[in-house]
Structures are given as C-alpha cells and as structure tokens.
Image (tube, rainbow, N blue to C red):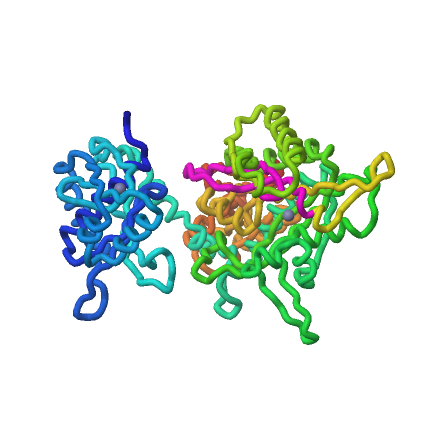
Amino acid sequence: MSSSLEQIRHSFAHLLAAAIGEMYPGAKNTIGPAIDNGFYYDFEFPLGPDGKPQAPSDKDFLKIEKTMRKLLPHWKGFEKISVSADEAHARFRGNPYKLELIEEIIKKGEEVTLYKSGDFVDLCRGGHAEVKDMRQDAFKIERIAGAYWRGDEKNKMLTRIYGLAFASKEELDAYVTMITEAKKRDHKILGPALDLFTFSDLVGAGLPLWTPKGTIVRNLLDEFVWSLRSMRGYERVEIPHITKKDLYVTSGHWEKYQNDLFKIKTREGHEFAMKPMNCPHHTQIYARKQWSYKDLPQRYANTTTCYRDEQTGELSGLSRVRAFAQDDAHVFCRMSDVKSEFLKIWDIIHEFYPVFGFSLKVRFSRRDPAAPEKYLGGAERWDKAESVLREILDEKKATAIDGIGEAAFYGPKLDFMAQDSLGREWQVATIQLDMNMPERFDLTCVNDKGEKERIVMIHAAIMGSIERFLSLAIEHYAGAFPLWLSPVQVKVVPVRETNLAHASEVGALFAAAGLRADTDVSDTGFGKKVREAKDMKIPYTVIIGDKDMEKGVVTLKSRDKGKIGEMKAEDALAMLAKESAEKR
Ligand SMILES: [Zn+2]
Ligand SMILES: [Zn+2]
C-alpha cells in the first residue's frame, strides 16, 4: 500500500528538521505538520552577535535540500519509541517548545511517543509515509516566514520553513509551473496595470477604489447577473449602508460578529454599525406588511457594498478587503417553494459561470447527524430541507461532494466550486436555506387556511462579491477579458497624423453602435500605439492608414487571433457587435 500525500508531507517535515538540526546545531525545532501542497516546520534559531536569529535565507534553500537528500538514503523507516515522561523530558531538555508539548500530552493522559528515522528522533504522534514513497526529486524548500509559537502574538516569533512535497516529480513540477504562471497573473499586479482599480493610503488598506475602466467591468458583471435574475421574477431593492444596533441584536450578529463590525457612535450617543451583510435589512423590507401565501415568493435582489473590520495583516488585494459589493439576493418563501426557488438559482449559477469558462462542482452541505445540538430547528424541518436539496441534485443529475457537517447552523446549503484556467479550485456561489432569520424576525405569511405560517429565507449570491469574483476572473483570463467584458473593446489606431480625422469618424461609428471604442489621438508613434493596445489587452485593434483610406476599408487585428484582414468599417463593426452580444 502506498502512503498518503499527507503522510509523505508530514514525513518530509521530519526530514527538514533533521537537516536543520545538522546544519544549525543551536536550532530548536517545534512543530512540523503537513499542509496543502507540502509541509512546514517552525524553528527557533539562536541569536547572532547582531541580536537577530541566525536563520537560513532563500539563498540556503538548495543547501537545505541537499542535506535532506543526503540524509534520506540512511532512513529505513519511522521507528516508534514509547517513553516515560521522565525520559521524554530528559531527551528534550533545553527545548521549551517540546517540553510544553510533552506536558500537554501527559496532562491528557496520553502516551508520549518518539519516532526515530536515521539518527533523527522527534516527538510525534505518528502518521508517517513509507520511506520508499519519499521521493528525492519530489520535494522542494519553498519559502521562509515568521510565525508566532502557537500562532499567538504574545509568544516568541519563530522561523517557519515551508516545503513542497508530492508523490512524484511530475506532480511537483506541474505544481511549480502552475504557481509560476499564477504569479504572472496576480490580480494585485495586473489589476492596477490594466487600470481597473487602485488603493490610496489616505482612504486606507482593504478599501479598493474603482477606476472608470474597472467600474465598466463591475457593472457588466452585475448587469449580467441581474439579467439572469430579472427573468426569474426577482425585484431590485435598495438599503442604507448603516443600521441601528437593534437590527443586529435581533439577528444575532451583534453578539456573534462583534469584532467584525465597523461601529459608529452618533452625536446623540446612539450606536450604529456599517452593514457586514444585507440579510437583516432585507428582512425589514419583507416585514413591511403581512403577506398572503399568494404573494410569495418575494425575491429581493440588491448589489450593494458591505463592510467588515478585517485585520490589516489579513488584507490581500481584492481577495480580502474591508469593503466589497455583494451581488446579493434573498428569497422569502414557504418551505413548499424551496425546491423551485433553489432550482431557479441553480440555473442562474449554471448559466453564469460557464460563460467565463469556469467549470463547476457542487457540494451538498448538510448537517452532522451526530451533533444535532449544533443546529437550529428540529430534526423534522432539517430532514425536509435536506431531502428537498437532495431531490434537486437528483433532478439535475449532479454528482455532489457530500459535505457532511458543512451546513450552516441555520440550514443546509449547496456550495459551488469553480475551477479556473490554471486548474485551481475556488469556492464561489452558494445557495443557503435559512430557517433562523425568519424565526428571529418573526416573518410569516397567511396560509390558505387563514393561519400565520412561518416562512423560510434563501440567501443567493451568484458572484459572492464582485471584488472576489474579479480577482478570480483577472487571474483566470490573465487580464485578457473576452470582448463582452473588456472595458475598451476596440482601439482605433491611425497610422499617421493624416489618418486621424478618419480614424475618429470610425471610432465614433463604433461608439454609436454601443461598442466601447477608443480612438488613439496621441502624438506617439504608430508602433507605440499598437504596443499600448496590446499591453492593455484590448481585444481588437482597427488600423487606419493611407492605403486603407484609399480602398475605403480598415485593417482589423485581434488580440487572440492576430491579423484578421481588411474589411469595411461597417463589417468589422457588425462582427464585433455580434461577438460581444453573444458573450463568447
Ligand atoms: Zn511525525
Ligand atoms: Zn444573506
């Protein structure tokens, strides 16, 4: 039987610690788990004369790898050694981290186990690979970072060495290639380079500002989602971005998400908060009157900015921000409507994502039947809700990942994962059934028997947030958006000064037809103009020179297909208009 990747990765962490022990005799090793794509190990390195830890740097990676490769052939396996508390203490004397771990193991009444491979012995609870599965050519030291002991900033800062490890060289190489490509596509670099968004120190970290070009892309995405919703009976609503504290006390957010809220004190001393989500506000739009079951479902769509007080260190480009626009929607309906409403949202998701070339996987996030206390509402309601979701999966013939225990405490959900052009998987849309909020806000309808009936609520963001979706889309396309989504669709470039007037006319013709056309009227040379259009990844360039003018044509070039040829401006226009409308 071959070892699992996790076992392989964890075993390489041992090998790293062995190599560091040999190369840096004063280093104290602490913990070394397997992680996605590899492993890490945290060390305390002794301080040098300059008062800084004498830790390795990126220049030492190859040396560390070399030492690991030297040691590995001497390893025959991981030999388990059970020791008494005293023996364990004696062995790790001088290493306060291991002593702390040993104390904890003893306190729990567990056995203290060491594992010996070659001459290296480490405190470990086990879970190792067979040494034959630790391939010399399938690991790599990746990077170094600081990390607090046990993740607590009150503790000492340690040096964390990250490594990559796979079952084979091919898998390692494929991963490294993917990461290299991903770096080139990093939206944090490409976004500003394409003039889509910017950050300002005065405005603050995690608060992206959208340029005219970026705003075009955002609106196009939002309009696309709205077009799919409006044909399914959704109505747009609008809400303020702040609320009295009372709303979140009732919804439970005040207690639960205290630290994530931006709070505001008014001059009269009242407490308000910036909204971290829209659902509580939307409940109050529903609650404006007593609905009959005949009026249901009520479907409210609202693309609007939410605010969360993320920690500065956690912020990252558009992926983790303090202000983000959710393409949010909530459906207020009866339990008997849940299936048809979920199906509508399912269809929207499946019409939306494939347009971008994202392939989707679905996870059925249901409750953990072994822990009923974690969930709100009785078993009967949950059984009903989960069986409805299962029916949907059957009807759609979808193979879902079984997300047992992945449900929200207030209801089961369908979570969608999208795979991008680099093969990376991202959690994107979710459809969530909520049996909690209608309870908290006492939302009802009058049913066919004239009685008040508790309704349910469905949360249904398609993109999640526009910021996050765009961060994925920029990297997925490497910034080269398809025609329909490009902020500038066509650049009209005159070869010389004498072609400028005609170029402007052609540009105006394209613009009048609704295409986002930009005529280059700058003084720069022709070559530079064409290069700029290329750098900005504009899908089409229309070139107009003397010959083109004589023949009454333009020369059309495509970013993706190269030169298309000479044609009448009207024909080029028709071609582009068609492609844009089809969202190809
Ligand atoms: Zn181990
Ligand atoms: Zn919601």
- Quadrant of res 354: top right
Query: Residue 518: horizontal and vertical position, in percent?
Result: 56, 52
* The residue stretch that appears in magenta: 408-437
Q: Is residue 342 above or below residue 502?
A: above
- Quadrant of res 572: top right
Q: Is residue 285 above or below residue 426?
A: below
Q: Is residue 128 left or right of residue 423?
A: left
Please tell me how many numbered marks the rendered image carries.
0
Q: Is residue 169 above or below residue 155?
A: above
What's the residue at 82%, 42% (across, down)? 452
Q: Is residue 3 visible?
A: yes
Q: Is residue 76 left or right of residue 112?
A: left
Query: Residue 370: horizontal and vertical position, in percent?
Result: 53, 35
Residue nearest the observer in this picture, 491 or 29: 29
Q: Is residue 357 visible?
A: no
Query: Residue 532: horizontal and vertical position, in percent?
Result: 44, 53
What's the residue at 62%, 59% (across, down)? 254
Residue nearest the observer in this picture, 296 or 563: 296
Quadrant placement of the N terminus: top left
Q: Is residue 469 left or right of residue 50?
A: right
Q: Tell whether position 37 is magenta.
A: no
Q: Tell whether position 426 is magenta.
A: yes
Quadrant placement of the C terminus: top right
What's the residue at 82%, 44% (across, down)? 291
Q: Residue furthest bottom?
A: 267
Q: Is residue 450 left or right of residue 323?
A: right
Residue nearest the observer in this picture, 171 or 367: 367
Q: Quadrant of ligand 1?
A: top left
Query: Residue 40: horizontal and vertical position, in percent?
Result: 29, 48
What's the residue at 56%, 37% (across, down)? 367
